[in-house]
Structure formats: structure tokens, C-alpha cells
Image (spheres, rainbow, N blue to C red):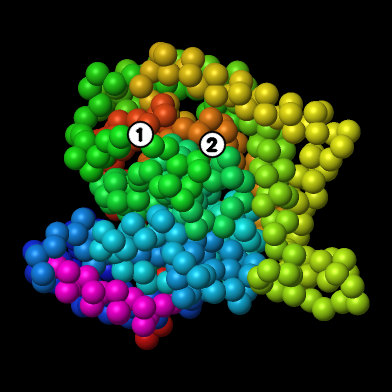
Amino acid sequence: MSLSVESTAAEIARAVNARDASAREITETFLRHVDAVDGAVGAYLRVEGELARAVAANVDARVGAGEGLPLAGVPLAVKDNMCLIGTKTTCGSRILENWTAPYTSTAVQRLLDAGCVPIGKTNLDEFAMGSSCENSALGVTRNPYALDRVPGGSSGGSAAAVAAREAAIGMGSDTGGSIREPGAFCNLVGFKPTYGRVSRYGLVAFASSLDQIGPLTRSVEDAALAYDAMAGHDPCDSTSLDRPLERTATALRDNLRGMRIGIVREFSLDKLDAPLRAAYERAYRDLEELGATLVDVALPTADYGIATYYLIAPAECSANLARFDGVRYGLQVAADDVNGMYERTRAAGFGPEVKRRVLIGTYALSSGYYDAYYVRAQKARTLVARDFASAFERCDLIASPATSCPAFALGAKSDPYSMYLMDYYTIPMSLAGLPALSVPCGWVEEGSATLPVGLQLCAPHFAEAVLLGAAHAYERTTRHAGRHAPRLEVRR
């Protein structure tokens, strides 16, 4: 079988398992492509060529010994807030710029066990705090479909790597939309599972009650294969759920007959610019043509999602990032006393957005304000989850926009408020801990750029098989993803 960087993860795994191709050959093909295009894209902070070749050789040996691997030889991009033993794990921050991971995160290890080959560590908004991948202290990542635009965040490096064909699967983490938004901006499937379905052990924490690891891929089938490999209980993670898993790669479907899909009253398309509104109206019609019945559902607390999230997430981040103090690991800036060392280290090590969220979170948790802000936000979060539970009494899935605009120009959203609003459609699902994904649903023209658009689908807790099955039916029929190629500058 002839394979190339255009091949999907499923195609690569089938060929390697059948011994029609070797993991070594595939790895070399992808490493050459990374060398040719990543100078323009900037997806990777570090390419781990030596490690990739060693892992590929091991995969070939395992396959040669008769072992069937669900992701044999599949090139993997790892977001740089996930530990991979012996490699730097920076979180896109100066404070961890030279820190080497002493162990491998559970989710990464499970993909390696399934046969994936790690190509390198990808860029991200610092400590996963951002919606554009512009907050990284260590590099700039560009959208492969328009190099003057952002790839989305915070998992922008992994999204750009998969979109630019520099990996077949990208690992992302999603706290308020950080997989789904870059998926929409980069013409990918970006999938956030139910909170607790994928272990967070070895993921550097941002907001522990919200963070969830998931895949970015160029097809729903690939997302299902990656999820099936990663998911499952892990005793190393106290938030990991110990309940049976339903395999999703065998539950993909070709139509939506008999399915009820909720359209959220509060997510009116009238708020969107005309080209984007037309793309989503077409997507809703496509769902009907596939056999689904569209029903009206209400999420009365949806408008409170942004305010709720930007109290809870900063509060948790202020606690989680307290460990980066210059004493135990990471950057240390010398001073005359320990308090001065703390202050100088954190001032030099953290970027503006991280400092902003730490300050907001510390304020919300401080004496006299805890009940007024943090406790009220947690009560609002309960109401958001309750609204979703009521909505799912009327439908099997919920459909909505993934983003309020296509990929925007680098530097276009310089104020925090406009950047925070980018997560309007994705945050409610995160607050409720629900599985959700973005799937390509069309294209819009902005100036000389043709930009992808993503449709968000959301399911009840633990209904990943239903969610991915429906997304596959939509993808298979509409085939939006393959209509345009990324615009890459190739180094000769």
C-alpha cells in the first residue's frame, strides 16, 4: 500500500499491521515533511527524531512478532503540557523552559502502547491559558490554511501539526474549548471526552476540575481509534472514572435516522456574521437530510458560562501554579531572601496572561470574596449542568457553532475580553463535564483566505460512541474536510 503524509491514522495502522509498510519508513517520511514545512508553521517546539526512530523500530519488532497494534506506526504530536520521559515539558513557559519530564503521562503511554510514534512536542498557549496559541513564551504557531492567522488555542501546535500533515494524531487538552476551537480553525476533528474518561496523570494541571485530554485528527475514525486507546480508568488519577468503556471505533454509522438533535435557543445564529451564519444553517440542514429530527432546546444559563468559567478556572490555576516557585523545579532567579526569590522567579517565569489569571483566581479565593465569587460560580456551574440534563431529556445530541468566527489574524484580538469571548460556545460543555467535538462543516471567504468552519456536537455523559457515530455520519456525507488543502511554504 502506498502511504504518504496525507494518509490517515487508520490507513497507516492497517498498512503497518499488514506489513505492507513499516513504521520506520512512515516515520522517516513524516520527519522529512516536518523539516520541510514546520519552519513556516511552527507547530513543534521540539522534534524528537532520535526518539521517534527508536520507537518506530520497536513497533516494527512488535508487529513482526505477530502483535496487532490498533495504531501501529501512527505519527503522534504531543502537546507540551504532557510528560514524555526524557524530553522537555515546558508548557510553553519560561518557568519550565529547561525542565525534563521524569515519567510519561498515562494518556501518552497508552497511545505509545497502541503503536504510535512520537514525532515531537507541540506549542501551546502558556500553561494552556489562551484561545489562539499566541500566549506561548517559546514560539509562534501559524494556521496552515492561512499563515497570517492563528491556529486556535490552547492546543494550537497539535492542531497545526495535524493540519499541516506533520502528524496523523495530535494530543490536546481541553479546559474551556482548547481542543474544539483549534479543531474548527484548522479543519480537524477536535474531540473532548467526558471529564474523567481519559487520565490526567502526567498532564501539567491548569484547572483540575475542567482539564481533559483528547485527540485532534483529520477524520472521526482516527479520533475514535485514539480515544479507544487512551480512555479507561487509571489509579494514578483520582478523578479517573472506573466504569466500563464502550468501544467507539466499531460504533461509527452512516446516517442519523431516528436521532433527535437539539438546537440551542440561546445560541442564535443571528449573532454571527452572514457567511458564518450561512455555513451553520447549511450544517443544520445537512443533519436533517441525514435523517435527524431537529428539536428546540433551552440552556437558560448559557450566557453565564464565560463569567462562571473565568472565576473557577483562574481560582484552580492560582492553586495549581503555586508549585512553580523556583524551589523544586524549573526556573530560579536569585535574590537576597526566599520571598524575593519567589517574586523574581514568578515575575520572570510567567507571562502576562498567566499572571492575569493567577491574580484573578487568588482574588476570588481570598478572604471576604470567596463566597461572593468562587462559591457563586460553583452554584452557577451546577445550574449549567442541570440545564444540559433537562435539554437531553428532549434530544440525543446537541448541535451548535464551535466558534463565533473563523481563524483570525495574528495579533487581531489584543485585549483579554475579546479573546475570552472566543470560548462562548464551548465553555458550557466543559463546565458540565460533557463529551463534545468539533467536526468540519464548511468554508468561508475572508479577503484572500478560504477558512474552515467547525460544527460542535455534544452528548450526555459517557455517550462517546453516540457522539462519534453521529459525527462520522455527518463527515462521511458532507466531506467538507477534503475540499481545500493547507497553504504551506515548503522549504526545498
* Residue 246 position within the rendered picture, expressed as x and y whole percent measured from the top left: 27, 35
Magenta-tinted stretch: 47-63
Residue most extreme to the front: 235
Badge 2 vs badge 1, beta-carbon distance below 8 Å: no
What residue is rendered at 39% in x and 60% in y? Answer: 108
Rendered view: 16 above or below 272:
below
Q: Is residue 191 left or right of residue 374?
A: left
Which is nearer the eye, 327 or 396?
Answer: 327
Which is nearer the eye, 359 or 475?
Answer: 359
Residue 200 appears in the figure: yes
- Mark 1 sits on what residue? 243
| Quadrant of the frame with the C terminus | bottom left
Disc 2 marks a residue whose amino acid type is Ser
Q: Which mark is residue 439?
A: none
Q: Is residue 237 left or right of residue 252?
A: right
- Mark 2 sits on what residue? 430
* Cα distance in 3D space between marks 2 and 1: 20 Å
Density class for disc 2 (Cα within 10 Å; few <14, some 14-19, many ≥20) is: many
| Label 2: which secondary element | helix
Q: Quadrant of residue 395?
A: top left
* Residue 350 position within the rendered picture, expressed as x and y whole percent measured from the top left: 73, 64
Residue most extreme to the right: 336
Rendered view: 436 above or below 410:
above
Rendered view: 299 above or below 484:
above
What residue is rendered at 35% in x and 34% in y? Answer: 243
| Quadrant of the frame with the N terminus | bottom left
What residue is rendered at 74% in x and 70% in y? Answer: 326
